[in-house]
Image (cartoon, rainbow, N blue to C red):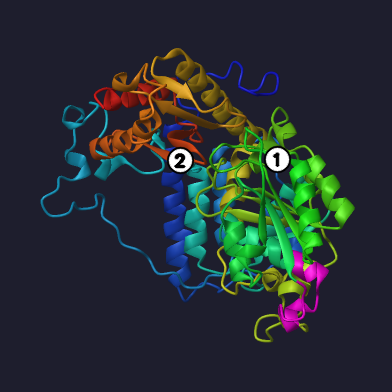
Amino acid sequence: MAEPSGAGDSIPLDGPGLDMAAGEEFLQEVFRILLEEGVRKSTDVTQKVCDWKEPQELRELLDLELRSDGEGRERLLQRCRDVLRFSVRTGALPVHTSAHRSAAPGQPSASQFSPAQTPCGTAPPASARLFPGHPRFFNQLFSGLDHHALAGRFLTETLNTSPYTYEVAPVLVLMEEQVLATLRELVGWSSGDGIFAPGGSISNMLAMNVARFWRFPESRSRGNWDLPRLGLFASQESHYSILKGAALLGIGTDNVHLVRTDERGKMIPEELEKEIQRVKAEGSEPLFVCATSGTTVLGAFDPLDAIADICARHGLWLHVDAAWGGSALLSPRLRHLLAGIHRADSVTWNPHKLLMVGLQCSAFLLRDSSGLLQRCHGVGASYLFQRDKFYDVSLDTGDKSPQCGRRADGLKLWILWKAVGTKGLAQRVERAFGATRYLLEQVKRREGFQLVMEPEFINLCFWFIPPSLRGQESSPEFWDKLGKVAPAIKEKMIRRGSMMVGYQPHGSQVNFFRQIITNPAVTRQDLDFFLDEIQELGWDL
């Protein structure tokens, strides 16, 4: 497995990486705070609508700085109280819940399950237990439950506001400002801009739109009519949002040129150069290159420095889609995977994936600090963005986004960061890397398991070859039959409710499993069970 020296070494995997009991106690206290401060006081007419503070005073009261070391429980609980106290009370209504959700007619309730009734003897069936927090859910690039981030999500929902202006979301506007600045610092920028977007796809589309405005400011008012035919470039392994963005923005999917990748799924810089030259020769105008740091299936990292050199030579906008791999920047041992990212013009980073912040949390980061984002998207609606307000209107950041109403996705990341610190987030990334390394060694040792390739990141791709197909690799029907194995095994595991993992074909390669570990609750026992279960479910195929 390609890894930096020391990364993932000596990381204990015998027990969970989170203190689940302490986390539940913390949430119980947060629930009490939410009920009293967020619900009761928000519907009490004797309370102020807001406890107004000037920006600098509020910054000091909130102590917004994100530090390396995490804080204790009582301090975090007080921070939750402060978020509610200093935020605008919009009148969220109380929600009445019962201790146990009733089951559908004819179905047992969750409390009726016992270990003896379950497929594995340890947990209830899929209808009651298969959710992204389960340590045997490996299906997506997100999984797991962080109690602190969940507390931030509860706070966000309770506040029920949009962070477009400081007057209605003072706490949230300042938090977003701080979190985005810290993410930019990790990229390697001392200044810049950014906004939280509803997912990595939209963040990538924002990059495309800003790049077009940067080159052709008149496109904002006159559209594409007077523009030359534009050329966008991304690798064959790039996220499908680049094609969707080209369609949405009127650039056209025919003008997205997919650059060849090497055997590991990395963009080949020489092929990028050839594509740019070809597009120029055809009379089109190259505009935008999207490099990927952590591809969806193989987890590949494009060579950013070499790509940046090409973009600089041709005057192209370089965007890095680090939605998946961006969190490696938190680890001193792993950030080399994104070497050269500081040369990008824009970056997409999704903390809701590897950091377990919870859906959704996607940052669109911009190196430009001249107000390009505002000029590209802003229209200055007079009922929101009045210029004669009594406070610093530069804090009314909502006009940077194409959205009006927008979720405050930075709060849950801020709370999580406050809880565990930069060091804790780095350890989370490194634990996932260490767990993948352990599983890789087990795959190599077990008969019937075959790697697609050595992983660069935490995407572990492999086939399971059932006994009926072993030794038949030279048969013309082998690969066709093998391609039916993963779907059959997945159907069995879902019907059993034991676990969930993704599969897909890739180019000329037939269906294989893609195992992703992001949940710190996953232990060595869970990983051993994962392989045992695939072997058992596929044995008679």
Look at 72% across and 81% down and name the residue there. 225
Q: Position of residue 285 (x, y in %)?
A: 79, 65
The residue sitting at the left extreme is: 106
Q: Position of residue 23 (x, y in %)?
A: 46, 38
Residue 475 higher or lower than 38, as above or below: above
Q: Quadrant of residue 457?
A: top right
Q: Which amino acid, by three-letter code, is at mark 1? A: Asp
Three-letter code for the amino acid on which mark 2 is drawn: Pro
Front residue of this view, candidates 118 and 511: 511
The answer to whether the residue labelled 1 contacts the one labelled 2, judged by CB atoms less than 8 Å apart, is no
Residue placed farthest to the front in the image? 476
Q: Which residues are magenta?
A: 211-228
Residue 295 seen in render:
yes
* Residue, disc 1: 302
Residue 325 lies in what quarter of the image? top right
Q: Quadrant of residue 72?
A: top right
- Whether residue 224 sits left or right of residue 190 in the image: it is left
Tell me which label, 1 or 2, sits earlier in the chain: 1
Residue 188: tell me if it is visible: no
- Quarter containing the C terminus: top left
Looking at the rendering, in which quadrant would you find the N terminus? Answer: top right
Q: Nearer the viewer, residue 283 or 325?
A: 283
Q: Nearer the viewer, mark 1 or mark 2?
A: 2
Whether residue 414 is in magenta: the answer is no
Other residues around mark 2 within 10 Å, as few (<14) / some (14–19) / many (≥20): few
* Residue closest to the far right: 313
Check residue 220 for magenta coloring. yes
Label 2 sits on residue: 505
